[in-house]
């Protein structure tokens, strides 16, 4: 420890290290500012009175602090609350179901004594190489499986991805030695029982990582809603926001000035963005490390 | 991920080999019955979601109408492809999709590698942690929010950039009617969204490099820049190649979310920002042209498939352990 400290000190003194540090700190700091800056504009916009926003444009710090936009937004909160509710529901159900099925699949595919593991893995992987394209898929789900205006359409397509199954397989094979499964088998435990009572409890970090990828996909989902949902009451949160933005821009372009009441004002839109993204930003500090761990494992072994 | 046949054939005729294969299957089914059952959900999912739609490729060769459905619509051969080709759409979309993806791969990996190297060398733990978190944040924000951000920055009347220009006495700039700047902007938006994710991957590789290498280099008198040049960068090459192969495999798959949310239905920008995926989506949602959009999608799939196969064959010949499958 003492030695490394002295080495560090020695490093700091050389001119090339000083140059490097200046470059490193400046570059990283600038990039971080660029990354967070647009988000600050939105938050600032949401706390600015609409008239000021329209007159002076977006500013980094609100010219006059105001929570009017939020008050206005929550005057008629039914739409937002409904979108929130359905999105939370889809996220929870989709994440739980996807996690269960993908960990089960990953478990089978890492069993060395399962003859067809490579063939099934390849069948799953092949879907990333070739497919029928988006349109036949859309026709199948909407015309033949009749998933229009059904929550199934918002949950089913995102349940599994080849990447996450392979990630899960890697997690299981690296944290659950084959010998443990072997000995449980000798003790008379069935394969499903082994999965439930031995494998699932020890792959907690893996479940967290894959679960977060799933939850993020469900939370940010707007594409499936745009394809399959026409009933406004079933919109996902992101699509609800998208629809609000689009309809007001459309009205603006057509020159339909309906007065402040009818068109969602600039600051209300920003407040809406904050409300929609809030939970992610709030949870972000706690979940970030699982993403980092998962990506690291996936990239090293995947 | 090797899809090779596992049967260890001993020179028996095809008939008996087939029988043997069948016997093997039933034996496996008997011993690992539960494992088969546990695979059912995944097999069903990929069958319905990925394999069944392949049948619908047939739409590409028909003049689709909803009353006829899959096999009742009139067959029209290569008519849809011919139209796409003769209108010049196919060439434009291919060029756009491929060029954007190449720009994303080159710029993205460069920036991510630079970031990872700089971050790995930063001594202050807090600074490192906070900046890394901030750079990763855009990855978690949905593309709809990116749509809002672009609007906030570039809107003619209230956009931040025009606000700054006006306050300096300049004439406002109408970005949404200036197609020329959009390729550069799209790359910037992509970088904004993805820089954190890739940095994490490269940073993981850097942390796995043995510190002894750096210590030895230091004793030999190598400065920071030399250490990076001769130790870090060469050791990042395998990771870069793996990522490159994956992205080459999806060279025909555009970043649909990015392009659709940022550009939307702004026709002025189509020539420079339309990619295969946005074109297919619009032909389906706005024009309801099932035959045409399936044809474009099929072209995209086949083109991508050929690129993957070619890349994989080349790699297999030269670096077998780096091959995708």
Image (cartoon, coloured by chain):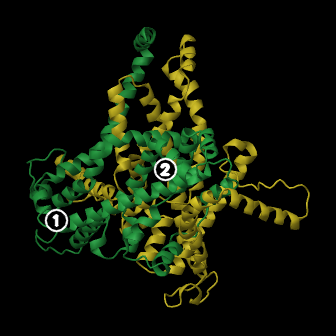
Residue at 30% over, 71% down: A234
| Residue A77 circle label | 1
Instruction: Establish if A35 lies above or below B43.
Output: above
Residue at 48% over, 44% down: B107
Which percent across, then down, holds residue B216?
57, 14
Q: Secondary structure at mark 1?
A: loop
- Regarding residue A223, the answer to whether it shows in the image is yes
- The reply, left or right, for residue B256 in relation to residue B296 is left
Instruction: Establish if B206 lies above or below A242.
Output: above
Say few, some or many: other residues with alpha carbon within 10 Å of mark 2 (under 14 / 14 to 19 / 20 or more).
many
Residue at 27% over, 53% down: A277
| Count of marks overlaid on the render | 2
Task: Say which quarter of the image contains residue B25.
Answer: bottom right
Which percent across, then down, holds residue A269?
20, 60
Label 2 sits on residue: B104
The chain drawn in yellow is B
- Regarding residue B170, the answer to whether it shows in the image is no
| Chain ID at mark 1 | A
| Chain ID at mark 2 | B
Please, which residue is most extreme toward the front here?
A187
Who is closer to the viewer here, B253 or A94? A94
Q: Colour of chain A?
A: green
Task: Say which quarter of the image contains residue B231.
Answer: top right
Say few, some or many: other residues with alpha carbon within 10 Å of mark 1 (under 14 / 14 to 19 / 20 or more).
few
Q: Are marks 2 and 1 in contact (CB under 8 Å)?
A: no
- Foreground mark, 2 or 1, reads 1
Residue at 45% over, 41% down: A205
Who is closer to the viewer here, A155 or B268? A155
Instruction: Establish if A191 lies above or below A178.
Output: below
Which percent across, then down, holds residue A233?
27, 73
Q: Secondary structure at mark 2?
A: helix
């Amino acid at each position: 420890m003492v030695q490394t400290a002295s080495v560090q000190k020695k490093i700091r003194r050389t001119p090339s290290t000083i140059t490097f540090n200046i470059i490193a700190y400046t570059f990283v700091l600038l990039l971080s500012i660029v990354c967070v800056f647009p988000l600050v504009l939105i938050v600032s916009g949401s706390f600015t009175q609409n008239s000021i926003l329209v007159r002076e444009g977006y500013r980094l710090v609100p010219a006059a602090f105001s929570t009017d936009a939020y008050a206005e937004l929550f005057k008629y909160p039914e739409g937002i609350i409904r979108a929130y509710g359905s999105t939370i529901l889809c996220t929870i159900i989709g994440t739980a179901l996807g996690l269960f099925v993908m960990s089960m699949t990953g478990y089978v595919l890492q069993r060395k004594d399962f003859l067809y593991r490579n063939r099934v893995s390849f069948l799953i992987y092949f879907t990333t190489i070739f497919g029928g394209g988006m349109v036949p898929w859309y026709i199948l789900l909407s015309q033949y499986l009749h998933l229009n205006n059904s929550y199934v359409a918002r949950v089913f397509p995102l349940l599994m991805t080849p990447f996450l199954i392979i990630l899960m397989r890697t997690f299981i094979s690296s944290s659950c030695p084959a010998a443990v499964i072997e000995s449980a088998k000798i003790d008379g435990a069935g394969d499903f029982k082994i999965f439930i009572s031995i494998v699932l409890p020890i792959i907690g970090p893996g479940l967290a990582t894959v679960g977060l990828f799933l939850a993020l996909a469900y939370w940010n989902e707007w594409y499936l809603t745009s394809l399959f949902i026409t009933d406004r009451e079933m919109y996902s949160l992101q699509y609800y926001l998208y629809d609000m933005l689009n309809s007001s821009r459309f009205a603006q372009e057509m020159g339909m000035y309906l007065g402040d009441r009818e068109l969602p004002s600039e600051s209300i839109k920003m407040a809406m963005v904050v409300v929609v993204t809030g939970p992610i930003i709030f949870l972000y500090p706690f979940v970030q490390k699982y993403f980092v761990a998962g990506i690291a494992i996936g990239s090293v072994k995947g | 991920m090797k899809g090779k046949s596992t049967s260890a054939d001993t020179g028996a005729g095809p008939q008996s080999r087939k029988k043997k294969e069948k016997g093997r299957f039933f034996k496996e089914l008997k011993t690992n019955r539960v494992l088969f059952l546990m695979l059912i959900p995944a097999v069903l999912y990929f069958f319905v979601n990925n394999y069944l739609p392949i049948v619908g490729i047939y739409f590409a060769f028909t003049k689709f109408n909803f009353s006829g459905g899959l096999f009742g619509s009139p067959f029209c051969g290569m008519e849809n492809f011919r139209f796409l080709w003769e209108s010049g759409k196919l060439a434009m979309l291919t060029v756009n999709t491929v060029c954007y993806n190449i720009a994303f791969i080159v710029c993205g990996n460069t920036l991510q590698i630079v970031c990872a190297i700089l971050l790995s060398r930063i001594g202050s733990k807090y600074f490192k942690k906070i900046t890394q978190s901030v750079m990763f944040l855009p990855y978690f924000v949905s593309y709809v929010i990116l749509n809002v951000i672009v609007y906030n920055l570039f809107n003619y009347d209230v956009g931040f950039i025009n606000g700054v220009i006006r306050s300096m006495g300049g004439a406002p700039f109408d970005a949404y009617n200036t197609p020329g700047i959009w390729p550069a902007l799209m790359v910037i938006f992509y970088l904004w969204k993805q820089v954190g994710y890739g940095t994490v991957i490269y940073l993981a590789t850097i942390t796995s490099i043995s510190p002894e290498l750096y210590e030895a280099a230091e004793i030999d008198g190598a400065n920071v820049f030399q250490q990076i040049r001769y130790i870090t960068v060469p050791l990042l090459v395998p990771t870069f190649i793996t990522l490159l192969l994956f992205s080459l495999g999806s060279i025909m798959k555009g970043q649909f979310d990015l392009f659709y949310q940022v550009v939307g239905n702004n026709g002025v920008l189509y020539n420079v920002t339309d990619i295969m995926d946005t074109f297919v989506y619009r032909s389906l949602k706005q024009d309801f042209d099932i035959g045409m959009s399936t044809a474009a999608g099929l072209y995209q799939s086949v083109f991508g498939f050929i690129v993957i196969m070619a890349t994989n064959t080349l790699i297999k010949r030269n670096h077998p352990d780096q091959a995708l499958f």
